[in-house]
Every structure is written in C-alpha cells, then in structure tokens.
Image (cartoon, helix red, strand yellow):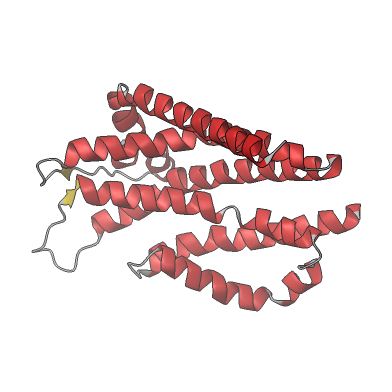
Amino acid sequence: MTFWDHLEDLRRCLFRMAAALIGVTVVLFFFKDFLFDDVILAPTEKDFYLYRLLGVDFSLSLVNIEVSAQFMIHMKVTFICAMILSFPYLVYELWRFVAPALYEKERKAVSGAFTFAGVLFYLGLAVGYFVILPLMVNFFAGYQVSEDVPNNFSLSSYISLFTSTVMTFGIVFEFPTVIAILSALGVVTKEGLKEYRRHAVCAVVILAALITPSGDPFSLLICTVPLYLLYEFSILICRKGESNA
C-alpha cells in the first residue's frame, strides 16, 4: 500500500470509530432515567449494595444551583459512558489498522496486550465505582468542621467526583500492562520490583495523594491499598513472563 492508501485506510478507521461513538452516545441520551437513577446516582442511595453490605444507613441528597448544569451534565455523562461502552470496539478498530504492519508473533503479543489492558481497565472502573466512590461519598457526606455548617452537595460537584474517581482508577489499573511490556523488553525484572518495594510504597502514597487532593487520611488509605496491590500483581506478571522465557 502507498502512503495515500494508508492515509485513506486511517480515515475510514477514524470514521467508523467516530460513527460508533456518536451512535452509542445518541442511544444512551434517550436512556437518561436508567443512566442516572440506576447507575450514576446509585451510590447516593441507601440501598446501594456496599452500604447494605457494611450495614451503613446512608443516603445523599443533591441540589442543582446552575441554570444549565443539568443539561450539560447529561451531555457530558452520556458521552463519557459512550466512550466506556465503545472502548472495546475503538480498540478493535485501532488493532485492525495496525495489525497488517506486524509479524505473526508481534500480532499475538499486541493482541494479548490489548485484551489484558481492556480487562484491567474495566476492572479499575469497577473498583472505582463499587468500592472507592461510595466510601468517599459516605465519608465526605458525614464530615463537618462544625455542626453549624451543614453539607449541601451540588450535582456538579458529585459528578466531578464520580468521573474523576472512576476514570482515574480505570487508567491507573493499566499499570500492570505497562510493567508486562517493560518486562518483555527486559527493562524491568521481578528482582528489581521486589528490591524497590519500599520505594514503591512511598510512590503509591504520593500517587494516591494526587488522586485524592482532599488530603484526608481515609481517602488516602482506600486509594493506597488497591494501588499497592497492583504493584504486587505486577511482580506476578514479571514472574510469569520469566518462567515462560
């Protein structure tokens, strides 16, 4: 294929990706009640599974203080959810474009990396949504500097916390994928990861502090634990790679 043939192929790839993303966005736009009542706002209700599991009687009422906020939030959340749902297809389209340029062994390696990265991404989203977010919401809702200052949370602030927490954990959970690639290239070894465990703890705490800029120890703790578990899982990834070698 000539340069212009590759360019045309890329244009078609990007067009299919955009069409899929727009299509899913349009469909989700008309499922507003399900998207918000059953998914986005579920962690604010007392019957959310984690609250029932922990025996916590908790619910959170949100208010809207901006004229156009609800419509803009509807658009923003719908697009983000469409990206999440379309993620496997978007990756598949990128794979279709890149695959012809790779050798057979490279195709298997990259295909496995894409699959592994996708699984970890959704696992990170699940941890952020089902564990981290409700704990953070529960903590912030009950924290007061004074009884004379009640907590009244806006819809915008909740959505900001929701998207930043869930998406951040989806991205952070890609860390083992990076380690697996570096291990395959010989840049990282299991001995090196074990040797720098203490340094990793400090790095994880700093990263958790960046993820939770509020600085409270509770949020810091619930973010640090899964991040450090990712580091330990990355050591296992290196072990597996070396044993196969």
- Compared with 228, 9 (above or below) is above
In the picture, which quadrant includes the C terminus?
A: bottom right
Q: Position of residue 185 (x, y in %)?
A: 79, 61
Q: Nearer the viewer, residue 160 or 129?
A: 160
Residue at 79 percent across and 66 percent down: it is 190
Please give left or right for residue 178 compared with residue 47 in the image.
right
* Picture residue at 46% right of the left edge, 32% below the top: 18
Residue 166: % across, % down:
43, 48
Looking at the picture, how far across and down is residue 45, in whole percent? 29, 37
Residue under the image location 30 percent in, 40 percent down: 76
Residue at coordinates 45% horizontally, 43% vertically from top-left? Answer: 130
> Between residues 26 and 151, which one lies in front from this camera angle?
26
Rendered location of residue 225, percent (x, y)? 54, 61
Q: Quadrant of residue 151?
A: bottom left
Q: Quadrant of residue 194?
A: bottom right
Q: Quadrant of residue 4?
A: top right
Residue 47 visible here: no
